Amino acid sequence: MNQVPGNQVLYPVRLGLSRGLRETRQSLTSPQDMSTYLILAVAFVVVLIFQRNSTVRGTHVSLAFSVLPGILGMMVAVTGLTGAAGSLAVEREDGTLLRAKAVPNGMVGYLTGRIVSVSLGALLGVVVVLVPGIFLIPELARTGPLGWLTFLWVLVLGLLAVLPWGAVIGSLAKSARAVQGPLMFPIMGVTAISGIFYPIFALPGWLQGLAQVFPVYWLGLGMRSAFLPGSAAAAEIGGSWRHLEMAAILGVWAITGLAAAPTVLRRMARKESGSSMQARRQRFLQRIG
Amino acid sequence: MLEFGQAPDDAGRDGRDGDAPVVAVRGLRMRYGSVDVLDGVDFVARRGEVLVLLGPNGAGKTTTIEIMEGFRKRSAGEVSVLGVDPAAGDERWRARIGVVLQSWRDHGRWRVRDLLCHLGGYYAPYSAPGRERPLDVDDLIETVGLGDQARQKISSLSGGQRRRLDVAVGIVGRPEVLFLDEPTAGFDPQARRDFHDVVHRLSDMDDTTILLTTHDLDEAEKLADRILILAGGRIVADGSADELARRVSGQAQVRWSQDGQHYVHATGDATRFVRDLLAQPGADIGDLEVRRASLEDTYMALVQRHETGWPLAAVARFEEVGR
């Protein structure tokens, strides 16, 4: 009956893109969000300043230079996962999702918007660490085009590996509060064994094995491979950047996540209704009341 | 103010003739565990009709609305909204439905106008000659009375303003059927009147079929073409406020004073009684007052009858009278 201009799927995706950009803009002008980024930046700058003059034992690479890329990798993993999980859980609780569901193709637009805004949020987290890093660490500024290319593909593949799983966690969580606190513990645990702040060789073998299951280690490794000189690969497991294994393992996370997320999201969305939202609102008000 | 334009004629609508019910519910059942919340609900709504669903808390009003919205699966029975089973409704069907949600704090960082433009955008592919979608956002904002707040952040709106926004979001896609679950809870009298105006305009000028629930009997009386009373999982009454009053009690109360004394008399034919009363020679009649059962009386009587254990007999009797 009705003429649908353009493509049925592309149209809501386009609306979702503008939605994501608008929400990113809102975040950039929000004092709350900006102070979070600012605190993050200040914390890393302080750490970098303290580490600037010490060097990695046996080399003349500064400690700050050797650690910063790993931190970037960690930022991508953590902001991607918690951003997706947190926003989904919060927006299920506050009714954003229900609104999307009440509008034709609204869920497509909503999810597109979220992918855009969480990705840009993670990118912003990376920039916030990277920019002061470039000023403080001269070696970082000398990164060649190949290094930036590696940075880009690791960033994109890393986001693809963590975003869908964040969405799955956010969909399964009972409430927003059930995500924000409890999710941080496993993330901190995995980060602690992933060789971000100190070489993974300091850990027992079984922990090294465990760390290599998760994306955090590979994102850290990938970012180090982008920014550190080739000779630094000697300090890694197997004495190499292992790009193939990296792409394979991050790829497996991405593919399984992208396969699982739509089903889980659909099941979660199906259960949304005005009364279930109302019930959560009551619980929330009781909690703070 | 919002101009809905000429209501499209029947031929312009895809294959629906004007008399086919827009909403048809038959034998609707909903079971949670071992409890039947809805136990055989039947009703229809026609184009442009405003139906108000009344009933005590827990009677299943929200469940009924959510099943029609396609947000909840039913246990048994037939439901058709715009000729489609809501459980199988696709996005095209969704575009013809409006749902007014009781929002809470979503989209707090968005500005009123931006959000309405964004959400309205999803309806644009479903625009049709005679029913352009979405509605003009600036007119819509004026209509719901948010003109001064159009550029404000939603988080800065008051509770009442937020509910006005909920109504605007529900109708931005120019729905053919609109569902509202307790839309005026938390409205001040002015907002309530504005809302009633919007409902009347939608049903009169845009032929929108409207189903809403409320606890406000005065509101039900003002808005409804037909009132449905839901109690014990069934529709125990279905008719205009007037019809319902007549069904529950065919009698009116006549009060008057005569020679300083006050009298009350219940009668089935108030006109005749009053004529006779006034015709008495030399009688000094004053303070004359004739009162039909109000919707509140009717509602209370119906719900009480149901709750005091004679529901089935009562239902049977109403159905008899109603046919």
Image: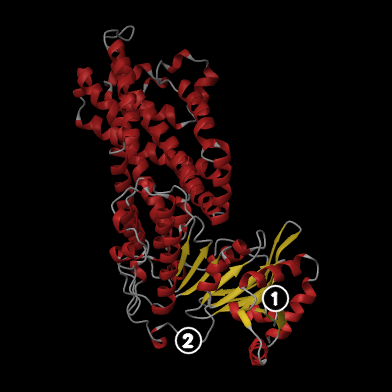
Does residue B167 appear left or right of residue B185 in this picture? left
Looking at marks 1 and 2 on the same chain, the residue that comes earlier in the sequence is marked by 2
Q: Position of residue A57 (x, y in %)?
A: 34, 7
Q: Position of residue A243 (x, y in %)?
A: 36, 31
Q: Is residue A97 above or below residue A143?
A: below
Tell me the quadrant of the picture where the N terminus of chain A can be found.
Answer: bottom left
**Residue depicted at 44% across the width and 32% down the height:** A215
Q: Amino acid at mark 1?
A: Gln
Q: Quadrant of residue B191?
A: bottom left
Relative to B70, say whether A142 is above or below.
Answer: above
| Kind of residue sitting beneath label 2 | Gly
* Closest to the observer, A17 or B65: B65
- Does residue B85 appear in the picture of this structure? no
| Chain letter of the residue beneath label 2 in the structure image | B
Marks 1 & 2, CB-CB < 8 Å contact: no
| In-front residue for pair A89/B253 | B253
Check disc 2 and report its element: helix, strand or loop. loop
Q: CA distance from mark 1 to mark 2?
A: 57 Å
Residue hosting label 1:
B261
In the rendered structure, find residue B18 and report the number of the disc placed on it. 2
Q: Secondary structure at mark 1?
A: strand
Please tell me the numbered disc located at residue A146: none
Give me the residue at 70% from left, 77% from top.
B263
How crowded pointer 1 is (Cα within 10 Å; few <14, some 14-19, many 20+) is rated as: few
Q: Nearer the viewer, mark 1 or mark 2?
A: 1
Q: Quadrant of residue A69?
A: top left
Q: Please tell me which residue is depicted at 52% across the width and 45% down the height of the picture.
A: A171
Same chain letter for marks 1 and 2: yes
